[in-house]
Amino acid sequence: MLKIKDLTVELEADAGLVRAVDGLQLSFERGETFALVGESGCGKSMTALALMRLLPDNGRVAAGRLELGGDELFGWPEARMRSVRGGRIAMIFQEPSTSLNPVMRVGDQIIEAIETHTPLRGAAARAKAIEWLRRVGLPEPERRIDEYPFRLSGGQKQRVMIAIALAGEPEFIVADEPTTALDVTIQAQILDLLRELQRERGLGLLLITHDLGIVAGMAHRVALMYAGQIVEVAPADEFFAAPKHPYARLLLSALPDASKRGEPLAAIRGSVPPLWMEFSGCRFEPRCDRAMPHCRTVLPPMERVAPAHMVRCVLYEPNAPQSAPHEPRAA
Ligand code: SF4
Ligand code: MG
């Protein structure tokens, strides 16, 4: 249904040219929830903005293809892309306050999406907007439709954003940390709602998050990103039961289990490398507990370890030189 091929995103930054996303490859099935996970600064949000063609002014898609049902969207002029954005692909942002228009009534923002992307107009569009507000669980939608965003709580604004995203009846939704700003109860309600709507409408959902707990409850497949590249792609159950990449293993072993609740989350030593760096070998090498000298010089390709499971690590290369793991260098 949707294919991302060799996506490379570059940003002009003070430090120089930053390659925020480097050769990303993913494809989605209809009705699938695909989670893109990783620490902050690994390229997840830039991937989302590139798919929407909403990169900041200093950013550009340097290479790659985005295929949606036979169309290649990166090559389209902006005017044509406008009919796709919100119509075939919609996005739910992390921060509703910055993406809702503060001087426009919430209902008008939903109606605009309906009139732009569906045949409904006027009273029919308004009735549909009320229906969407009810659907996303906003109380008293007949009254609240005429309110301005500042009258709503954070959770309510997030619901309005989801209503706007759904109102264009997209085939595909990109949700970037859709619940990070919300408290736990509202977070759970929003995720339930997304799951339900997604199942019912056959939506493809790209869920971007650093929260592996959310991934476990929502995703069919998981792609783990590190420093601009995907390092592991797997069905969610395989990813959680038997993660392969050393980064995935460390992340999952740092997840608090029920018995450790209340203790601080174990952090992985070191941090994500700045993306203006020139990389020669494996980008995770400075933090890896399995690293070998070889890892510093050769970028491992993605290797298939099971029918739907790919990993970027020399440990899984069929002819890789094996040697005893050494102490990771301090990052
Ligand atoms: Fe660790 Fe080497 Fe695998 Fe990179 S390639 S994750 S450094 S073992
Ligand atoms: Mg982000």
Image (cartoon, rainbow, N blue to C red):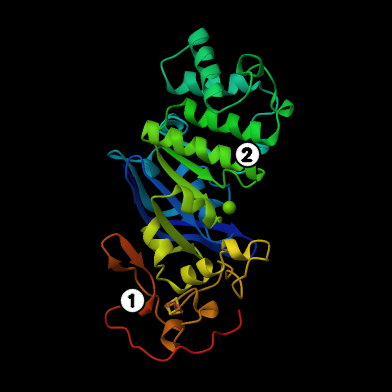
Name the secondary structure under disc 1.
Answer: helix
Front-most of residues 127 and 7: 127
The crowd level at tag 2 (other Cα within 10 Å; few <14, some 14-19, many 20+) is some
Front-most of residues 284 and 209: 209
Which residue lies most toward the front here? 259
Tell me where residue 30 sits by quadrant.
Answer: top left
The amino acid type, in three-letter code, at marker 2 is: Ile
Q: Is residue 93 visible?
A: no
User: The C terminus appears in which quarter of the rendering?
Assistant: bottom right
Is 302 rendered above or below residue 116? below
Tell me where residue 137 sits by quadrant.
Answer: top right
Front-most of residues 309 and 72: 309
Residue at numbered disc 1: 316
Indicate which label's residue lies in the foreground, 2 or 1.
Answer: 2
The amino acid type, in three-letter code, at marker 1 is: Tyr
Location of residue 16 in the rendering, given as x and y in whole percent from the top left corner: 59, 65
Say which residue appears at 39% left-offset and 36% top-offset: 199
- Who comes first in sequence, dot 2 or dot 1? 2
